[in-house]
Image (cartoon, rainbow, N blue to C red):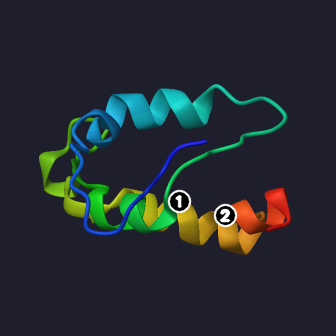
Amino acid sequence: MVRNPSGARYDAEFIKKFERINVALSRARKLLIIVGSKKFLSEAGIIDLPDLEGDHSRDKINFPVYREIIDTINFRGRILTAKDILGE
């Protein structure tokens, strides 16, 4: 268990690397479980996403990648809160 106190500041550079996001999401075969603070990821996960074919006119600058991931999970999957899992 980890704490996520409101108002705390964290360095999000590690989770903002598009290469890491790509590897994390593309390795799952049957099930993908993401654990983290939805609020933190939504707010901190703004990245410059390059076009993977090298067309810089299609780069997405200041793209809210984790907000998009969360929205997709809400639509196609399910988000569980700590309360859902721990029953508190």
Q: Locate residue 73, reporting x and y percent.
A: 66, 63
Query: Contact, CB < 8 Å: mark 1 with mark 2?
Result: yes
Badge 2, how many Cα within 10 Å: few under 14, some, many 20+? few
Q: Residue at x 52, y 44 (%)?
A: 2
Residue 73: image tag: 2
Q: Residue at x 71, y 42 (%)?
A: 33
Q: In the displayed structure, would residue 46 be above or below residue 36?
A: below
Q: In the displayed structure, would residue 36 be above or below residue 42?
A: above
Q: Amino acid at mark 1?
A: Ile
**In this rendering, position of residue 66 left or right of residue 85:** left
Nearest to the observer: residue 70 or residue 4: 4
User: What SS does tag 1 mark?
Assistant: helix
The quadrant the N terminus occupies is top right
Q: Locate residue 38, reporting x and y percent.
A: 50, 64
Q: Quadrant of residue 15?
A: top left
Q: Residue at x 68, y 72 (%)?
A: 74
**In this rendering, position of residue 1 left or right of residue 60:** right
Q: Amino acid at mark 2?
A: Ile
How far is mark 1 from mark 2, CA to CA? 6 Å
Nearest to the observer: residue 12 or residue 60: 12
Residue 82: image tag: none
Q: Locate residue 62, reporting x and y percent.
A: 18, 62
Q: Which residue is mark 1?
A: 69
Q: Locate residue 16, reporting x and y percent.
A: 28, 42
